[in-house]
Amino acid sequence: MDETEFWEIVDSTREAADGDPEDHADLLVERLVRLDPDSVLDFARHFEARYNRAYRWDLWGAAAVLLGRAGDDAFDYFRCWLIGQGREVFEGAVQDPDGLADLLDDFDEELDGDGEELGYAADEAYEQLTGAVAPDLGLPPQAAKPAGTPFDVEDDAVLADRFPALWDRFGAD
């Protein structure tokens, strides 16, 4: 599976789910079980590589603005959700997290930002296809610490300064 096919699967299932992350995960599993196990593992590798790539302080700060706060688990689920938003939003956010202010049509804290189930979709599909747990994907493990320069993701003043567009649109209550 190449990168284009990976993103096509992400996009088509998100669109069919009307943006609901839980429905998106269910539809993603349904789509993946129509593939062969090796293709499901390829999908999982693409997902995991992007998940690890998004382990960055600046994206954690953007998540904190959007979610109102973002602990370790919330940031993990946010990264899954970000991948689920598709290539344009994901790549745009990686290049400029503050640019999410322009990339997102809207953001509902109750519905958006938590894509935990998306992170398990490939594993679930693989298990349905084979009856076995997915093997190690052969990717380097996630870094011990996020990439970039650490900053206080719980300090509103720091977040407003680092992410002015995102803060103005989604953070300032």
Image (cartoon, grey):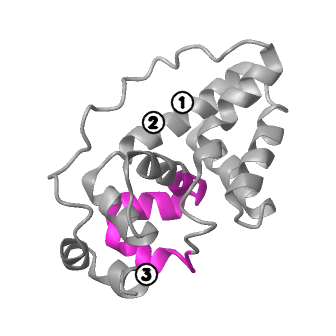
Name the quadrant containing residue 96: bottom left
Q: Nearer the viewer, residue 164 or 68?
A: 68
The three-letter amino acid code for the residue at tag 3 is Phe
Question: In the rendering, at what x and y percent does residue 58 appear?
Answer: 27, 59
**In the image shown, does 48 or 63 lie closer to the viewer?**
63
Mark 1 sits on what residue?
45
Residue underneath mark 3: 170
Above or below, 22 relative to 104: above
Task: Quarter of the image for the C terminus: give it.
Answer: bottom left
Q: Nearer the viewer, residue 11 or 79?
A: 79
**Picture disc at residue 79:** none
Over which residues does the magenta segment extend?
81-107
Identify residue for label 2. Answer: 49
Residue type indicated by callout 1: Arg
Find out whether the residues at labels 1 and 2 contact each other: C-beta distance under 8 Å. yes
Left or right: 90 in relation to 127:
left
Which secondary structure class fits the magenta region best?
helix
For the residues marked 3 and 1, what is the alpha-carbon distance in whole angstroms?
32 Å
